[in-house]
């Protein structure tokens, strides 16, 4: 399963990972024990990291940027699926270092931003984001706040499609992953209060034209924000998120042997302050947006996108959203699995442009 992903550049792999080297690394592994996993992919990152540093010292920006990207791509695999152990936390920090090194040469440039977050015991904490703005567009700019799920963080959000459409892109981490200042919880949507307040203080961003786009588990938060924060956003995209059925014990057991490579329940648990399969089964039902009474509230315009054959989160959750509250837009891909395949973004971005420009 992982080799199929590597051969097609799918999460956690990309065009910057070497499928042949990945095959050799996987062939040497006897388990997915964290230290062994990290060591295997850190070894693949090392020559790219050394080549990047050498090129940077020599003033060769092209080679330095390329090799830092490749080093980052392999460190990203090393911390996969989540930095929920000491070795993988170290790998995540290494991947971030390589990402920011490579980002030095991005055009348009990347601005890493720190958004003050407070609440409960979180005083003094920050939500961290990566902001990129289209060149030459009139300000204040419409902005899409984007985030991934349990294994794909702000560093993996691809800003290109938004920038090409004339939209600013602010990539953040959903609660419980990456640099997020709080774990996932039944009230963790409060994270976005800090993000929206930060946007409102930026004269180059248009607080009246904010969209949110959450992918995979992150789609859960996009759907919730569409209902709880409709006054703060113009539109929302739930890209393959869970809603209700995904949190039931029967589905959790089924998904554990679906298209996700390994540790799905455990990685979901880690994003919500838990660690084991059993803890996730016990906790997950609390997250149901149906049980929370969210789905029949008024909501911002909401686009739902997924593959009908998704074995990570059931397509029934998308239908449940359509059955409650006001009308929604939807695009489901009959022969695709989780996320709906590579062409989903080609539907999402024009829909955002229609509402924001």
Image (spheres, grey):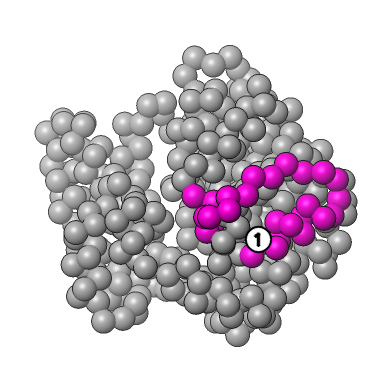
Residue 292 in the image: above or below residue 101: below
The answer to which of 1 and 135 lies nearer the viewer is 1
> Among all residues in the image, which is located at the extreme front?
334
Q: Residue at x 70, y 63 (%)?
A: 316
Residue 4 in the image: above or below residue 208: below
> Among all residues in the image, which is located at the extreme bottom?
278
The answer to which of 126 and 105 lies nearer the viewer is 105
Could you tell whether 169 is left or right of 296 in the image?
left
Q: Residue at x 24, y 62 (%)?
A: 22
**Residue 116 can be seen, yes or no:** no
Q: Disc 1 designates what residue?
A: 315
Q: Is residue 334 magenta?
A: yes
- For the residue carrying disc 1, how many other residues have a C-alpha within 10 Å: few (<14), some (14-19), or many (20+)? many
Where residue 280 sits: x, y (%)?
62, 78
So how many labels did they put on this image? 1
Q: Quadrant of residue 311?
A: bottom right
| Picture quarter with the C terminus | top right
Q: Which residues are magenta?
A: 314-341
The answer to which of 112 and 314 lies nearer the viewer is 314
Where residue 149 sits: x, y (%)?
55, 57
Could you tell whether 27 is left or right of 117 in the image?
left
| Picture quarter with the N terminus | bottom left
Q: Is residue 325 magenta?
A: yes
Could you tell whether 243 is left or right of 269 in the image?
right
Question: What SS does tag 1 mark?
Answer: helix
**Residue 337 can be seen, yes or no:** yes
Q: Residue at x 80, y 49 (%)?
A: 228
Where residue 119 sits: x, y (%)?
72, 56
């Amino acid at each position: 399963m992982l080799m199929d992903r590597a051969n097609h550049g799918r999460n956690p792999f990309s065009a910057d990972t070497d499928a042949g080297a990945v095959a050799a690394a996987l062939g040497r592994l006897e388990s997915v024990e964290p230290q062994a996993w990290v060591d295997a992919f850190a070894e693949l990152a090392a020559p790219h990291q050394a080549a990047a540093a050498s090129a940077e010292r020599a003033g060769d920006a092209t080679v330095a940027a390329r090799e830092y990207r490749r080093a980052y791509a392999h460190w990203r695999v090393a911390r996969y699926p989540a930095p929920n152990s000491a070795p993988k936390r170290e790998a995540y920090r290494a991947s971030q270092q390589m990402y920011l090194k490579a980002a030095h040469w991005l055009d348009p440039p990347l601005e890493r931003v720190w958004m003050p977050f407070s609440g409960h015991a979180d005083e003094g904490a920050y939500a961290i984001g990566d902001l990129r703005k289209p060149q030459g567009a009139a300000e204040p700019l419409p902005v899409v706040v984007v985030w991934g799920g349990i294994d794909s963080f702000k560093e993996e959000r691809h800003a290109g499609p938004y920038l090409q459409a004339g939209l600013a892109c602010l990539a953040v981490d959903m609660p419980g992953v990456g640099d997020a200042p709080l774990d996932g919880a039944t009230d963790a949507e409060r994270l976005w209060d800090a993000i929206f307040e930060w946007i409102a203080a930026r004269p180059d961003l248009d607080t009246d034209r904010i969209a949110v786009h959450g992918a995979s588990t992150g789609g859960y938060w996009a759907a919730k924000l569409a209902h709880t924060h409709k006054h703060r956003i113009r539109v929302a995209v739930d890209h393959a998120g869970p809603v209700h059925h995904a949190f039931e014990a029967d589905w959790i057991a089924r998904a554990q042997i679906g298209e996700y490579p390994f540790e799905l329940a455990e990685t979901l648990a880690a994003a919500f302050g838990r660690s084991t399969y059993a803890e996730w089964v016990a906790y997950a039902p609390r997250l149901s947006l149906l049980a929370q009474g969210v789905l029949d509230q008024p909501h911002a315009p909401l686009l739902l996108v997924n593959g009908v054959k998704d074995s990570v989160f059931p397509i029934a959750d998308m239908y449940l959203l359509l059955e409650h509250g006001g009308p929604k837009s939807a695009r489901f891909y009959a022969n695709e699995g989780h996320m709906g395949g590579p062409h989903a973004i080609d539907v999402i971005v024009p829909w955002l442009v229609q509402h924001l420009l």
